[in-house]
Each structure stands twice: as structure tokens, then as C-alpha cells.
Image (cartoon, rainbow, N blue to C red):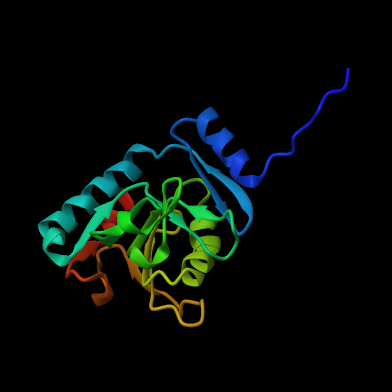
Amino acid sequence: MAVLQHELTLGEAADQLSRALPGHRVEILQGRLTVTPPPDGSHALSLTKLSRAFERAGIEGSGGEWVQGVGLWLPALPEDFAIPDFSVVDEDFRDAHVTKNYYAPNVFRLVVEVTSSNWSDDLYVKVECYAQAGIPAYLIADRKHGEALLYADPVDGKYPDPQRFKRGQSVPVPESVGIRVELSVDTLLDG
């Protein structure tokens, strides 16, 4: 009896891993399958407080919305996608649906990642991916190194060097996001 084997595409493998590992974040970045464990309490609390800061600043009146865990289609490779921790998107972002739960990058105004155990993806790979996708602003709460990095205004698929913010400082959200808010580095790092 012959056994037929089916070689999985990256997308199929990502779907299987997502089903097999509930709570984990499965992404395809630069043609590489990555899996991030569920967030710890400080990570989750950082996102909660980030959400509150945008609500207090009046995000609803800006033509934008904040969302967590919404897929961002990355156009560099056909199956690439990321699932940012937090994003500010155009309020009509659902009209930019590409496939599955992934949306076109042009509706993302700001992407925020709070580092976890695979912090190098946030600090290196996603910087390249988000710049190539034309994301206007990318903020990283780098818990590994105790700072926040703000990348903004990519040119030719690359961000200029980031602005770095230390504990005790606040990060001003770039005007391109469409809302004025300053985010405490301590809150971003600790929740």
C-alpha cells in the first residue's frame, strides 16, 4: 500500500501550528515561520494601559481605531504576515482585508510590539518587514534592554535610525498616527 505524502506550504503549516498551540502567536516573517508564546502578565498589562492611553487621547475622533492581534499582510513575500501586539489603524481598516485575518499595510498607522522571549524578531526582523511594508511608525517596548525604540517615516523600504527613550521618559506618538499622545516608557516596559 502506497502512502501519499503532502508537503505543507508555509501558510498551511502556520494554520496547523495556530490550531495546535492556542494562545501562541504564529507568524511568517521573511519566509520563516515563527511562534511566540502567550504573553506574560506585564506584557498583557502594557497593552491594556496602551489601549487606555489611546482612548483617553480620543482615538475615536481621529478617524482611527486601536486593535490588538490583527493580522498585517506583509507584501514582500506571498505568505508573509505579522500579528502585531497593538496597532492603530484607519477606522475603515476592514475594507482593506487581504486574506484570512490579514489586512493591507496601508491602513496601519502605528504598530507596537512588546518584546517577549523571541525579542530579536521585534528588534531586527520586524523592523525590516514593517519598513518594507511602509508602516509609518513602529514602536518597540524593548523589555530585554529596558528602553523604547521608535522607528518612523520609512524611505525606500527602510527606517532611519530609531529614536531611543529610556525609563522616566515619554514617547511622543508621531503626527502621522493622527492623534497626540505621549506614552510612558515605564508603563510600556512594565505594564
31 relative to 63 in the view: left or right: right
163 relative to 18 in the view: left or right: left
Q: Quadrant of residue 9?
A: top right
37 or 75: which is nearer to us? Answer: 75
Please name the residue shown 18% across and 69% down the image. 179
Please name the residue shown 46% across and 54% down the image. 144
Q: Quadrant of residue 14?
A: top right
Does residue 176 show up?
yes
Please name the residue shown 43% across and 56% down the image. 72
72 or 86: which is nearer to us? Answer: 72
Q: Quadrant of residue 78?
A: bottom right
Q: Position of residue 190 (x, y in %)?
A: 30, 49
30 relative to 173 in the view: left or right: right
Q: Residue furthest right?
A: 1
Please name the residue shown 74% across and 38% down the image. 7
Q: Quadrant of the N terminus?
A: top right
Q: Residue furthest top?
A: 1
Q: Position of residue 175 (x, y in %)?
A: 24, 76
Q: Position of residue 19 (x, y in %)?
A: 51, 30
Q: Position of residue 64 (x, y in %)?
A: 21, 62
Q: How many marks overall?
A: 0
109 or 4: which is nearer to us? Answer: 4
179 or 187: which is nearer to us? Answer: 179
Does residue 191 show up?
no
